[in-house]
Each structure stands twice: as C-alpha cells, then as structure tokens.
C-alpha cells in the first residue's frame, strides 16, 4: 500500500509540475513576475515551514520549550527580508551572485556563484535526509535510493517551468504537510501521551537552552536576511511588491502556529522515548518511530507522503535557486533555458553526493555551508547596501577569498569538527567578520582615509583580543566578534559615505563583464 500511494503521489506531483511549461529564461526563473498574493503566501509559508518543522522537532527534543526561539528568529528574518524587498526590486534582483557580479565584476560573480551553487545543496540536505530517514524506517530503503528518488522527483517536476512549477507544487505539498502535522498531533495526544521520561525543570523553561544559544539563533538568521536568496527570488516574482510584503506578514502568523505545534511534537517525542540516550536516536528518528508504531498501514503511507512533501517543499526552492547561480554566474549562460535545466541536475547530483559522503554529520555540513556562504555573500551584499558609488573590485575578491580561507583554515585546525572550534568561535562568524573587516579597510584606503583605516583596524584587533582573552561570554563570542566587524563597517560608512553618488552596475553583456 505504501509503495502504491507513493507512486500515485509521484505521478500527481509530476502532473502538477507539467501543468505549465516555461518558454524563456525569465518565465522559468521568475514566472514573468506575475505571481499573485495567494501564490506568494503559500510559497513563502511552504519554504520556511518545511525547514522549521524539521529543526523545531529536533531542537525541542534536545532542549525543550526554549526551542521556540529558533522558530521566532526565522519568522523575524522572513519579515526583515520583506522590508528590504523595495531595495532588491530597485536593483532588478535575480540572485545574490548576479547582484554582486553586476556591482563588482566577473570574478566576484563567478566566485560567489560557485559558493552559492555549492552550499545550497548543503542547506537542502537536512530535509532530504529527513525523508530518507522516514523511508528507511518505514520501507527499509537504503539511503542512496531514498535520496536519489527524492532528487529525481524534484528535477523532473521543476524542469518543466521552474518558478511556475514550484508554485503549482507547493500548495499541494503544504496541504500534505499540514495533514501530517494534524495526524501527528492526534497520534501523540492522550491516551498515548503518558511520559516515560522525567525531564529537569530547565527543559520546560523558555530560556532553558541558555541566552547564548538563543542569541546565536537570532544572530545567524538576522545575518541571513541579506542572503536568503530563495525567499528573495520568490518575493521578487510577485506581480506587486506590496502584495509580496503582505503575503510575508500573513505567512509569519501561520509560521508562529507551526512553530508552536512542532515544538510541542518535539517535546512529546522526548517524553515518550524511554531511553533517549541509550537508543542513540535523534529527535526526528524518534518522532518517526513513535508515529509509525501507532499507525495503520494506510496512515503510514499518508504520513510518508507528508514527509516526502516536507522534503520537496524545502529542497525544491533551494536547488532551483542554486541552479540559477550556477547557470548564470558560474557557467555564464544568461539566456539559455537548456543550461538552467542542466544546472538543476548539477545541484541535485551535488546534494546526493553530499548526503552519501557524510550522512550522519548534518551539523558539520551546516557549519561548513554557513562558513562558506557567509564569507562570500554577506559582507559584499552589505557593501552594495551601504555605498552607492564605486568600490575597488579587487578588494572585494580579496575579502571573499580571505574570508573563505579563514573559515576553511579554522575548520581544518579542529579536524572539521561540528562542535569543537578554535577559541570556541564557530568558523562561520570568523569567516564573515574577516570579510567585513577587509572590505571596510579597503573602503577607507580607497577614499584616502589612511589614518582612519589604521585606527579602525587597531581598535577592532584590540577588541577581538579582549573578547577572546576574557572568555566570560563563551556562547556569545561568535556573535560579539561578528558585531565588532559590523561596527567596523559602520565606522567606515560614517567616514566615507557619499549620499549623492550613483551605484554603478555592470550589465549582463560579456563585453562589459570582461573588462
């Protein structure tokens, strides 16, 4: 029965994706900017709820009620992205790598495109592995088969019409996920919910995880505002920017309900797991075991489709977004629909390889992906936001390369650990900070502010040394380090801002890009 329903589900998803076919690149990547309010609402809700459900269940299983703050930080990020949409719309946004390429030239375009194309499959991996864990639990499928089938389904459906195919699929997938959540709530409600594990008081406290971890969650997601490429592309495809804003705000209310429900499911999973440490299961795996143990074959199949929808809702937009950066900005194919579809296949293959390489180390993958993405995208995008006039292109390239090199070097020193870091600072903070410091210094030197540059670097270096030596706020070191880099950029902006200057954007033509 499970196989039959899954085959039916796959056939229906393919039909939805094939409902419309894109005939040009603009239609494929943005739906000709004709998506309405309700479509944007469903797509944004589907995007973030698919990520939140997976993370919240696992985080609540580990930390308890304080996991709510992670979801709140994501909801805040989504709202902040919507507030920046007029600025992105003004710059004819296609992708972050395209924006950086038109501002800083071909080399920056290619490097940032490679980083985005290489890291988005990492971010998509969490939900793909969640679906794989379910299929492994319910059907005993090997990991490679689960990942391959999920990826193939995504590629086949999206390749028909890109953004329009996503719009067609996300509504059905969101419906299936909501059915799965309601069923899980019903399954874990009394009389099943008799606790088998007694948790300490801090498990029930809103700040039980600690203020430092909560600050990291908010810092990480606020930092993501300027490079949440998948959401920005979705909102940019709206017919009217104001509709995109309203849809995002209404979506946030929906997300808050999903956050509360997912946190409750994670907490109940922990309470209903007799020996969580001895069983060696993470939150999602324990959640699947409990639900499946109390389900009929029909509901196992329906819940399986819900979990597959959960994977596709997240993986689809991310792989699609990564494919745009790979095709446009790495391959240089700005007007080829065929190459966009090839780029989508490339992204899918990369995700499968990542999943098979280190499948049990999702936390490491996330640290690795955020380290590279933050180094290559956050600082340069802030430069475009802060300064309207020309900026030294070689300095941007040097800053990105230095940030990536710093992040990889710090990762290598600890054996690419997901939990042990040099000075206790996650490399994703160090990489982004180094990029910002070099960009701010380059700006000051470019504007002949030599004394200002020396003073700024000295003060930043002193502050960094004091933070590391003090060590009293170990959980906050990364956030504080990043904040010092942001302060340095603000300092450079105050000394060198040019309110009347015009931002020079390089067009897409090869003749200009090659200068």
Image: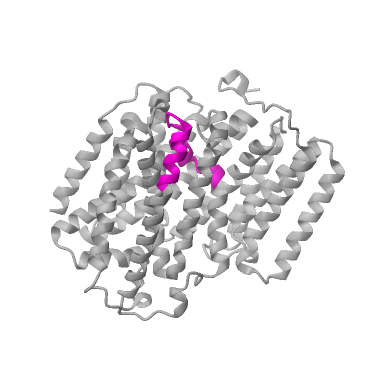
The residue lying at 80 percent from left, 41 percent from top is 495
Quadrant of residue 379 within the rendered picture: top right
Q: Nearer the viewer, residue 438 or 197?
A: 197
Residue 355: tell me if it is visible.
no
Judge from the rendering whether residue 183 lies leftward or rightward of residue 322; answer left or right: left
Pinpoint residue 291: horizontal percent, then vertical percent.
24, 65
Q: Nearer the viewer, residue 358 or 326?
A: 326
Pinpoint residue 168: horizontal percent, then vertical percent.
30, 36
Pinpoint residue 467: horizontal percent, then vertical percent.
72, 64
Quadrant of residue 153 within the rendered picture: top left
Magenta span contains residue 238:
yes
Examine the residues drawn in magenta and state their main secondary structure: helix
Q: Residue furthest top?
A: 511
Rendered view: 384 above or below 70: above
Magenta highlight range: 225-251
The residue lying at 35 percent from left, 69 percent from top is 281
Magenta span contains residue 176:
no
Judge from the rendering whether residue 80 lies leftward or rightward of residue 183; answer left or right: right
The residue lying at 73 percent from left, 32 percent from top is 499
The residue lying at 20 percent from left, 44 percent from top is 9
Rendered view: 296 above or below 404: below
Q: Nearer the viewer, residue 377 or 30?
A: 30
Quadrant of residue 358 within the rendered picture: bottom left
Q: Nearer the viewer, residue 330 or 192?
A: 192
Rendered-image quadrant of the C terminus: top right
Rendered view: 178 above or below 475: above
Rendered view: 322 above or below 504: below
């Amino acid at each position: 029965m499970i196989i039959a329903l899954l085959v039916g589900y796959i056939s229906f998803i393919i039909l939805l994706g094939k409902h419309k076919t894109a005939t040009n690149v603009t239609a494929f990547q943005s739906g000709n900017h004709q998506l309405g309010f309700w479509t944007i609402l469903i797509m944004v809700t589907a995007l973030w709820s698919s990520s939140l459900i997976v993370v919240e269940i696992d985080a609540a299983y580990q930390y308890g009620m304080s996991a709510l703050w992670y979801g709140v930080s994501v909801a805040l990020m989504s709202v902040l992205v919507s507030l920046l949409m007029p600025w992105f719309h003004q710059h004819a946004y296609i992708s972050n790598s395209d924006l950086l390429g038109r501002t800083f030239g071909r080399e920056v375009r290619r490097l940032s495109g490679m980083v985005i194309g290489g890291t988005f499959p990492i971010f998509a991996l969490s939900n793909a592995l969640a679906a794989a864990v379910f299929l492994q639990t319910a059907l005993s499928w090997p990991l490679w088969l689960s990942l391959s089938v999920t990826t193939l389904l995504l590629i086949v459906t999206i390749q028909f019409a890109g953004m329009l195919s996503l719009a067609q699929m996300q509504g059905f997938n969101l419906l299936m996920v909501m059915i799965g959540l309601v069923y899980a709530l019903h399954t874990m409600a009394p009389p099943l919910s008799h606790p088998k594990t007694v948790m300490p008081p801090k498990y029930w406290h809103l700040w039980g995880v600690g203020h430092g971890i909560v600050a990291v969650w908010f810092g990480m997601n606020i930092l993501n505002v300027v490079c949440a490429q998948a959401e920005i592309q979705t909102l940019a495809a709206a017919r009217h920017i104001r509709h995109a804003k309203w849809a995002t705000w209404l979506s946030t209310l929906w997300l808050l309900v999903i956050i509360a429900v997912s946190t409750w499911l994670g907490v109940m999973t922990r309470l209903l797991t007799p020996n969580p440490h001895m069983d060696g299961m993470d939150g999602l795996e324990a959640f699947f075991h409990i639900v499946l143990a109390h389900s009929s074959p029909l509901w196992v199949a329906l819940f399986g489709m819900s979990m597959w929808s959960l994977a596709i809702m997240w993986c689809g937009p991310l792989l699609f977004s990564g494919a745009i950066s790979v095709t446009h900005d790495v391959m240089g194919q700005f007007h080829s629909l065929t190459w966009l579809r090839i780029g989508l296949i490339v992204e899918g293959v990369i995700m499968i390889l990542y999943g098979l390489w280190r499948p049990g180390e999702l936390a490491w993958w996330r640290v690795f992906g955020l380290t590279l993405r933050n180094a290559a995208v956050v600082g340069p995008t802030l430069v475009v936001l802060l300064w309207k006039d020309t900026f030294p292109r070689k300095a941007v390239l040097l800053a990105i390369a230095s940030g990536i090199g710093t992040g990889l070097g710090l990762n290598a020193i600890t054996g690419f650990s997901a939990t042990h870091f040099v000075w206790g600072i996650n490399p994703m903070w160090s990489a982004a900070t180094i990029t910002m410091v070099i960009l701010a210094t380059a700006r000051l030197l470019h504007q002949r502010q030599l004394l200002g540059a020396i003073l700024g670097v000295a003060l930043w270096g002193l502050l960094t040394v004091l933070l590391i030596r003090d060590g009293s706020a170990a959980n906050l070191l990364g956030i504080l380090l990043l904040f010092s880099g942001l302060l340095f950029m603000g300092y450079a902006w105050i000394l060198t801002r040019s309110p009347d200057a015009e931002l020079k954007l390089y067009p897409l033509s090869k003749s200009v890009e090659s200068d």
